[in-house]
Amino acid sequence: KAGVTQTPRYLIKTRGQQVTLSCSPISGHRSVSWYQQTPGQGLQFLFEYFSETQRNKGNFPGRFSGRQFSNSRSEMNVSTLELGDSALYLCASSQAVGMNTEAFFGQGTRLTVV
Amino acid sequence: GEDVEQSLFLSVREGDSSVINCTYTDSSSTYLYWYKQEPGAGLQLLTYIFSNMDMKQDQRLTVLLNKKDKHLSLRIADTQTGDSAIYFCAEEFGGGAQKLVFGQGTRLTINP
Protein backbone atom coordinates (compact mmCIF):
# COMPACT_ATOMS: atom_id res chain seq x y z
CA LYS A 1 0.00 0.00 0.00
CA ALA A 2 1.57 3.29 -1.06
CA GLY A 3 2.12 5.92 1.60
CA VAL A 4 1.38 9.61 1.51
CA THR A 5 3.05 11.24 -1.48
CA GLN A 6 4.01 14.88 -1.55
CA THR A 7 5.34 16.70 -4.58
CA PRO A 8 7.63 18.36 -5.19
CA ARG A 9 10.15 17.44 -2.47
CA TYR A 10 12.06 20.71 -2.79
CA LEU A 11 11.17 24.15 -4.09
CA ILE A 12 12.94 27.47 -4.30
CA LYS A 13 10.79 30.52 -4.90
CA THR A 14 11.29 34.26 -4.86
CA ARG A 15 9.51 36.67 -2.54
CA GLY A 16 6.18 37.76 -3.96
CA GLN A 17 5.66 34.61 -6.03
CA GLN A 18 3.02 32.03 -5.36
CA VAL A 19 3.43 28.28 -4.94
CA THR A 20 1.25 25.18 -5.09
CA LEU A 21 2.10 22.00 -3.22
CA SER A 22 0.45 18.66 -3.83
CA CYS A 23 -0.43 15.75 -1.56
CA SER A 24 -1.79 12.33 -2.53
CA PRO A 25 -3.19 10.49 0.49
CA ILE A 26 -3.12 6.80 1.22
CA SER A 27 -5.72 5.00 -0.87
CA GLY A 28 -9.05 5.00 0.93
CA HIS A 29 -8.18 7.91 3.21
CA ARG A 30 -10.58 10.83 2.93
CA SER A 31 -8.99 13.29 5.34
CA VAL A 32 -5.93 15.36 4.43
CA SER A 33 -4.30 17.79 6.85
CA TRP A 34 -1.48 20.23 6.24
CA TYR A 35 1.20 21.37 8.68
CA GLN A 36 4.05 23.86 8.56
CA GLN A 37 7.29 22.99 10.34
CA THR A 38 9.88 25.67 11.12
CA PRO A 39 12.76 25.69 13.61
CA GLY A 40 11.23 28.61 15.48
CA GLN A 41 7.54 27.70 15.61
CA GLY A 42 7.72 23.91 15.39
CA LEU A 43 4.84 22.03 13.82
CA GLN A 44 1.74 24.11 13.26
CA PHE A 45 -1.62 23.05 11.87
CA LEU A 46 -2.70 24.80 8.67
CA PHE A 47 -5.99 23.17 7.67
CA GLU A 48 -7.83 19.89 7.25
CA TYR A 49 -10.04 18.67 4.42
CA PHE A 50 -12.50 15.82 4.40
CA SER A 51 -14.54 14.89 1.34
CA GLU A 52 -13.60 18.13 -0.41
CA THR A 53 -14.72 20.32 2.54
CA GLN A 54 -12.44 22.28 4.83
CA ARG A 55 -13.40 21.22 8.36
CA ASN A 56 -10.79 23.00 10.40
CA LYS A 57 -8.34 25.84 9.90
CA GLY A 58 -5.31 26.95 11.85
CA ASN A 59 -4.17 30.45 12.63
CA PHE A 60 -2.52 31.40 9.35
CA PRO A 61 -3.13 34.40 7.07
CA GLY A 62 -5.42 34.18 4.07
CA ARG A 63 -2.39 33.85 1.78
CA PHE A 64 -2.45 30.18 2.75
CA SER A 65 -5.26 28.26 1.10
CA GLY A 66 -6.04 24.73 0.13
CA ARG A 67 -8.46 22.48 -1.61
CA GLN A 68 -9.29 18.83 -1.94
CA PHE A 69 -10.40 17.01 -5.05
CA SER A 70 -12.96 14.24 -5.43
CA ASN A 71 -10.18 11.63 -5.45
CA SER A 72 -9.03 12.99 -2.02
CA ARG A 73 -5.82 14.49 -3.43
CA SER A 74 -5.15 17.88 -1.92
CA GLU A 75 -3.24 20.99 -2.87
CA MET A 76 -2.18 23.93 -0.79
CA ASN A 77 -1.35 27.30 -2.20
CA VAL A 78 0.66 30.13 -0.74
CA SER A 79 0.39 33.48 -2.48
CA THR A 80 2.68 36.51 -2.20
CA LEU A 81 5.46 34.50 -0.63
CA GLU A 82 7.44 35.97 2.25
CA LEU A 83 10.87 34.93 3.55
CA GLY A 84 9.17 33.63 6.68
CA ASP A 85 7.20 31.10 4.63
CA SER A 86 10.38 29.06 4.20
CA ALA A 87 9.57 25.79 5.93
CA LEU A 88 8.93 22.10 5.60
CA TYR A 89 5.29 21.59 4.64
CA LEU A 90 3.89 18.25 5.70
CA CYS A 91 0.65 16.67 4.78
CA ALA A 92 -1.04 13.84 6.65
CA SER A 93 -3.81 11.51 5.62
CA SER A 94 -6.28 9.65 7.76
CA GLN A 95 -9.35 7.53 7.31
CA ALA A 96 -10.95 9.79 9.96
CA VAL A 97 -13.85 7.38 10.30
CA GLY A 98 -14.95 5.94 13.64
CA MET A 99 -11.92 4.87 15.63
CA ASN A 100 -9.58 4.99 12.64
CA THR A 101 -8.13 8.45 13.08
CA GLU A 102 -4.37 7.78 12.96
CA ALA A 103 -2.62 10.36 10.79
CA PHE A 104 0.15 9.21 8.47
CA PHE A 105 2.56 11.81 7.15
CA GLY A 106 4.33 12.27 3.86
CA GLN A 107 8.01 13.16 3.49
CA GLY A 108 7.18 16.83 3.12
CA THR A 109 7.95 19.60 0.67
CA ARG A 110 10.83 21.84 1.68
CA LEU A 111 10.09 25.36 0.48
CA THR A 112 12.82 27.98 0.44
CA VAL A 113 11.85 31.57 -0.26
CA VAL A 114 14.71 33.85 -1.35
CA GLY B 1 -5.88 26.33 25.52
CA GLU B 2 -3.94 24.10 23.19
CA ASP B 3 -0.49 23.45 24.53
CA VAL B 4 1.75 20.41 24.52
CA GLU B 5 5.08 20.55 26.34
CA GLN B 6 8.16 18.34 26.03
CA SER B 7 11.72 18.62 27.19
CA LEU B 8 14.00 19.45 24.28
CA PHE B 9 16.90 17.04 24.76
CA LEU B 10 17.57 13.56 26.11
CA SER B 11 20.85 11.67 26.01
CA VAL B 12 21.10 7.97 26.90
CA ARG B 13 23.63 5.19 26.62
CA GLU B 14 23.15 2.48 24.03
CA GLY B 15 21.27 -0.43 25.57
CA ASP B 16 19.65 1.67 28.30
CA SER B 17 15.97 2.65 28.35
CA SER B 18 14.89 6.08 27.14
CA VAL B 19 11.90 7.84 28.67
CA ILE B 20 10.47 10.84 26.86
CA ASN B 21 7.87 12.87 28.72
CA CYS B 22 5.05 15.10 27.55
CA THR B 23 2.32 17.15 29.19
CA TYR B 24 -0.85 18.26 27.44
CA THR B 25 -3.79 20.51 28.20
CA ASP B 26 -7.02 19.23 26.70
CA SER B 27 -8.60 16.47 28.76
CA SER B 28 -11.20 15.83 26.05
CA SER B 29 -8.66 14.52 23.52
CA THR B 30 -9.53 11.10 22.18
CA TYR B 31 -6.07 10.05 21.07
CA LEU B 32 -2.50 10.97 21.94
CA TYR B 33 0.29 10.13 19.53
CA TRP B 34 4.02 9.67 19.36
CA TYR B 35 5.86 10.46 16.14
CA LYS B 36 9.52 10.06 15.20
CA GLN B 37 11.36 12.36 12.80
CA GLU B 38 14.78 11.55 11.40
CA PRO B 39 16.91 14.22 9.68
CA GLY B 40 15.43 15.38 6.40
CA ALA B 41 12.42 13.12 6.73
CA GLY B 42 8.72 13.42 7.46
CA LEU B 43 7.00 12.17 10.59
CA GLN B 44 6.76 8.47 11.26
CA LEU B 45 3.83 7.35 13.42
CA LEU B 46 5.31 5.24 16.21
CA THR B 47 2.35 4.52 18.40
CA TYR B 48 -0.75 6.07 19.88
CA ILE B 49 -2.93 5.59 22.92
CA PHE B 50 -6.65 5.95 23.32
CA SER B 51 -7.58 8.28 26.13
CA ASN B 52 -9.38 5.62 28.18
CA MET B 53 -6.21 3.51 28.41
CA ASP B 54 -3.43 3.77 30.99
CA MET B 55 -0.76 1.87 29.14
CA LYS B 56 0.03 0.47 25.74
CA GLN B 57 2.97 -1.76 24.85
CA ASP B 58 4.24 -2.37 21.35
CA GLN B 59 7.51 -4.34 21.15
CA ARG B 60 10.22 -2.04 22.58
CA LEU B 61 7.80 0.85 23.04
CA THR B 62 5.67 1.46 26.13
CA VAL B 63 3.28 4.39 26.39
CA LEU B 64 1.99 5.47 29.79
CA LEU B 65 -0.91 7.88 30.17
CA ASN B 66 -1.82 9.67 33.40
CA LYS B 67 -5.05 11.49 32.63
CA LYS B 68 -5.29 13.09 36.05
CA ASP B 69 -1.94 14.84 35.61
CA LYS B 70 -2.28 15.11 31.79
CA HIS B 71 1.07 13.41 31.43
CA LEU B 72 2.16 11.09 28.64
CA SER B 73 5.42 9.21 28.38
CA LEU B 74 7.16 7.04 25.82
CA ARG B 75 9.64 4.45 26.99
CA ILE B 76 12.03 2.88 24.50
CA ALA B 77 13.63 -0.26 25.85
CA ASP B 78 17.17 -1.30 24.83
CA THR B 79 17.83 1.97 22.99
CA GLN B 80 19.84 1.57 19.79
CA THR B 81 21.75 4.04 17.61
CA GLY B 82 18.92 3.85 15.07
CA ASP B 83 16.62 5.38 17.66
CA SER B 84 18.46 8.71 17.37
CA ALA B 85 15.83 11.16 16.17
CA ILE B 86 13.42 13.84 17.31
CA TYR B 87 10.31 12.49 19.04
CA PHE B 88 7.07 14.44 19.02
CA CYS B 89 4.03 13.88 21.13
CA ALA B 90 0.76 15.14 19.71
CA GLU B 91 -2.72 15.69 21.02
CA GLU B 92 -5.76 15.36 18.79
CA PHE B 93 -8.25 18.23 18.81
CA GLY B 94 -11.45 18.96 17.04
CA GLY B 95 -13.39 15.76 17.52
CA GLY B 96 -13.60 14.01 14.19
CA ALA B 97 -11.51 16.62 12.42
CA GLN B 98 -7.88 15.76 12.11
CA LYS B 99 -6.10 18.53 13.97
CA LEU B 100 -3.00 17.59 15.89
CA VAL B 101 -1.21 19.90 18.27
CA PHE B 102 2.44 18.93 18.63
CA GLY B 103 5.00 19.42 21.32
CA GLN B 104 8.33 21.02 20.46
CA GLY B 105 9.99 17.64 20.03
CA THR B 106 12.63 15.87 22.12
CA ARG B 107 15.96 15.22 20.43
CA LEU B 108 17.19 11.81 21.55
CA THR B 109 20.93 11.25 21.35
CA ILE B 110 22.48 7.82 21.89
CA ASN B 111 25.94 7.54 23.41
CA PRO B 112 28.00 4.44 22.58
Image (cartoon, rainbow, N blue to C red):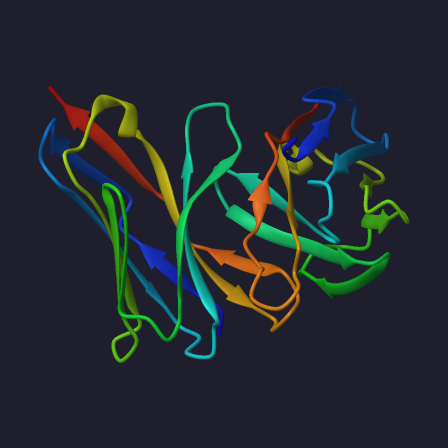
Question: Which residue shows up at 63% across the image and 33% down it?
Answer: A3
Looking at the image, residue A46 sits to the left or right of residue B70; the answer is: right
Question: Which residue shows up at 64% across the image and 33% down it?
Answer: A1
Give the total number of marks visible in the rendering. 0
Residue A73: give x, y in percent of width and height. 81, 42
Question: Which residue shows up at 66% across the image and 64% down it?
Answer: A97
The front one of B109 and B62 is B62
Q: Is residue B64 above or below residue A76?
A: below
Residue A69: give x, y in percent of width and height. 89, 47
Q: In this view, does B42 lie above or below A71?
A: above
User: Where is residue A8, by image quadrant?
Assistant: top right
Q: Which residue lies furthest to the front in this view?
A: A1
Question: Which residue shows up at 51% across the image and 27% down it?
Answer: B41
User: Where is residue A85, by image quadrant?
Assistant: top right
Quadrant of the drawing holding the C terminus of chain B: top left
The front one of A22 and A60 is A22
Looking at the image, residue A100 sits to the left or right of residue B110; the answer is: right
Q: Is residue A31 above or below residue B111?
A: below
Residue A21: give x, y in percent of width and height. 78, 33
User: Where is residue B105, by image quadrant?
Assistant: top left
The front one of B56 and A48 is B56
Looking at the image, residue B1 sits to the left or right of residue A82; the answer is: left
The front one of B11 and A81 is B11
Residue B64: give x, y in percent of width and height. 24, 62
